[in-house]
Image: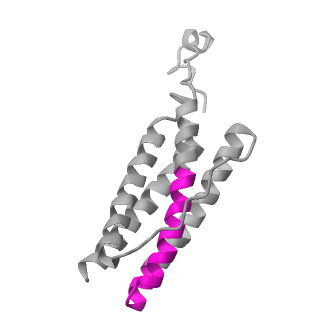
Amino acid sequence: MYYSYYWPVKYAAQKEQRVKSAPPFQDQHRFLQMTLQAIYNEREAQLFYRALEDRAITPFQKRQIRHAHDDEVKHERKLTNLYKILTGHPPHVRNPSPPEIPDFQVAVRKAFEDELEAAEMYRTMYLMTHLQWVRDLLMELMTDEFEHANRFAFIRAEL
């Protein structure tokens, strides 16, 4: 259907006004530093959850901790890939030392708090970028961390 009666020609002839696009990052250096810290934190969580799983009492607790551990492995892989894409080289992140878990209940509380901190960090990183694919990745990580916090809250409630 032809809309010449509804769309004046003078509007069609106007040049497109270019909208200034926002830069991809508010502070790319800070974003990359946070990505490196997140990779380290994910590695630390993997070690912590492996040790925590060994101390778990019930099969349910072990399954919940194993699920969080497997997600942390996935997170490390995705963050490493993100860093490689943004910089062109792999991240150089030191390996954390093995954790000590003297008390299971205290360790579960620490895991709960660490997961909430990780979610907050990913939210901060999410707000630092306008790249949709990066935001999608960070949203996935953030929701996973909230899920882990819920799992640890449930474990703690049954202790």
Residue 12 position, x and y percent, is 59, 15
The quadrant of the picture occupied by the N terminus is top right
Residue in view at x 42 percent, y 41 percent: 124
Task: Give the dominant element type of the magenta stretch: helix, strand or loop.
Answer: helix
Residue 111 position, x and y percent, is 38, 66
Picture layout, residue 12 above or below residue 99: above
Horizontal arrangement in the rendering, residue 63 relative to residue 110 (left or right)? right
Residue in view at x 43 percent, y 79 percent: 64
The quadrant of the picture occupied by the C terminus is bottom left
Way the structure is coloured: one colour
| Part of the protein shown in magenta | 38-64
For residue 79: magenta? Answer: no
Image mark count: 0
Horizontal arrangement in the rendering, residue 153 relative to residue 129 (left or right)? left
Pick the front one: 40 or 149 = 40
For residue 40: magenta? Answer: yes
Residue in view at x 48 percent, y 68 percent: 99
Pick the front one: 127 or 148 = 148
> Looking at the image, which residue sits at the far right?
88
Pick the front one: 126 or 68 = 68
Residue 116 position, x and y percent, is 35, 57
Residue 14 position, x and y percent, is 59, 10
